[in-house]
Image: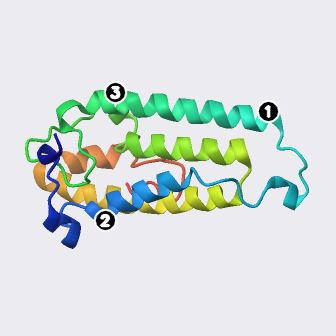
Amino acid sequence: MFSDWGFSWGGWLDNRRGEWWLLAQLLLITAHLLPVWPAPASFGVAIWPKPLFGLGLLLLAFGLFRALEAFRCLGASLSPLPAPKPANQLIATGSYAICRHPLYRAVLLCSAGVVLATGSPLHLLLLVSLAAVLRGKARFEEQGLRALHPDYSQYAAVTSAIVGWVPGLDWR
């Protein structure tokens, strides 16, 4: 499975298949396990409101659901690396009819859920950093998709990248 994705020691050294983008993404996702900082009490909120906590958990769960749906749509084209697999199929149905990078959108939904559930400025910074990394990873990925699929540019012109209404997360 891992060799099918194109991992190599050389790639980790020179980023040939976008290994550094993947590493940055994984580090930022893992950093979401850090404790809330500073605590909401330090900016005048004794206890984080339960409705925000609950809404954050719902958003996190919704993001996980959307990720599973996007995984299912990708099938054999799935790879954690942004460079498409050589036999990659252009998927433009299901989640991919709504946006070109629904897995990245799902990761951002999960991160936003953590921010909302915790009220943590640290986690808000992680969300913004994750958005920047996923934007870069998506741009890297799209170079390969354009080279493999002549009709990718037409698909990209009518389908939002990650989040259509957020500046920087759509470049149609």
Secondary structure of the residue carrying numbered label 2: helix
Labels 1 and 3: the sequence-earlier one: 1
Q: Are marks 1 and 3 in contact (CB under 8 Å)?
A: no
Q: Nearer the observer, disc 1 or disc 2?
A: 2
Give the residue at mark 2.
Answer: 20
- The picture places residue 118, in percent across and down from the top left corner, at 72, 46
Quadrant location of residue 14?
A: bottom left
Give the residue at mark 1.
Answer: 51
Specify whether 9 is left or right of 100: left
Specify whether 154 is left or right of 85: right
- The picture places residue 26, in percent across and down from the top left corner, at 41, 54
Real-space Cα separation, disc 1 to disc 2, in angstroms: 38 Å
Three-letter amino acid code at disc 2? Trp
Binning the other alpha carbons within 10 Å of mark 2 as few (below 14), some (14 to 19) or many (20 upward) gives some
Give the residue at mark 3.
Answer: 94
Specify whether 154 is left or right of 128: left
